[in-house]
Amino acid sequence: MKKQVTALCVVAAAALMFVGCGGSKSKGPDAVALEFANLVEKGEFQKAGELADKDTKQLLAMFAGMASEEDKPSGKATYKVLETKIDGDTAKVKMEKTEDGESESDYIDLVKEDGTWKVHAKK
């Protein structure tokens, strides 16, 4: 019985730490950038827009409406985060895209809006 109480206390403490640290609601810029890239790769522009600031969301909607089938991503690429730099309410995430055995890297810019990281496409 004593072991069960101890195990329950450990689980409760871990749960409190998780909630106290923001849980899954507070995604870091690297997690947001990775999720955004994967959604765009799948052609899920509306869902990707939920991770973007207002201007970027409008650009995504415009691209989705104008893109022909051959312009849309293949859905075969994989992404990984190489580096994240945070400077106050802005962040820059270096991503690597691998497709058909070839890799290239680029940056995704993010801004913090109301405590949430959002992808920001620079004009």
Image: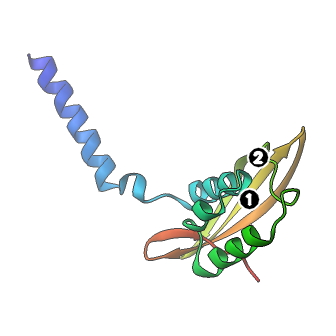
Residue 91 placement (x, y as % from top left): 62, 69
Q: Which mark is residue 16?
A: none
Residue 39 placement (x, y as % from top left): 65, 54
Camera-nearest residue between 87 and 75: 75
Q: Amino acid at mark 1?
A: Lys
| Residue furthest to the left | 1
User: Looking at the rendering, which quadrant does residue 71 occupy?
Assistant: bottom right
User: Looking at the rendering, which quadrant does residue 93 occupy?
Assistant: bottom right
Q: Amino acid at mark 2?
A: Gly
Mark 1 packing: few (<14 Cα in 10 Å), some, or many (20+)?
some
Q: How is the image coloured?
A: rainbow
1 vs 2, front mark: 2
Q: Circle 1 is placed at which residue position?
A: 94
**In the figure, 11 relative to 18: above or below?**
above
- Closer to the chain start, of discs 1 and 2, is 2
Residue 11 placement (x, y as % from top left): 24, 33
Q: Which mark is residue 75?
A: 2
Camera-nearest residue between 80 and 46: 46
Quadrant where the C terminus is found in the figure: bottom right
Residue 21 placement (x, y as % from top left): 35, 55
| Residue shown at the point (57%, 70%) measured from the top left | 118
Tell me the SS state at disc 1: strand
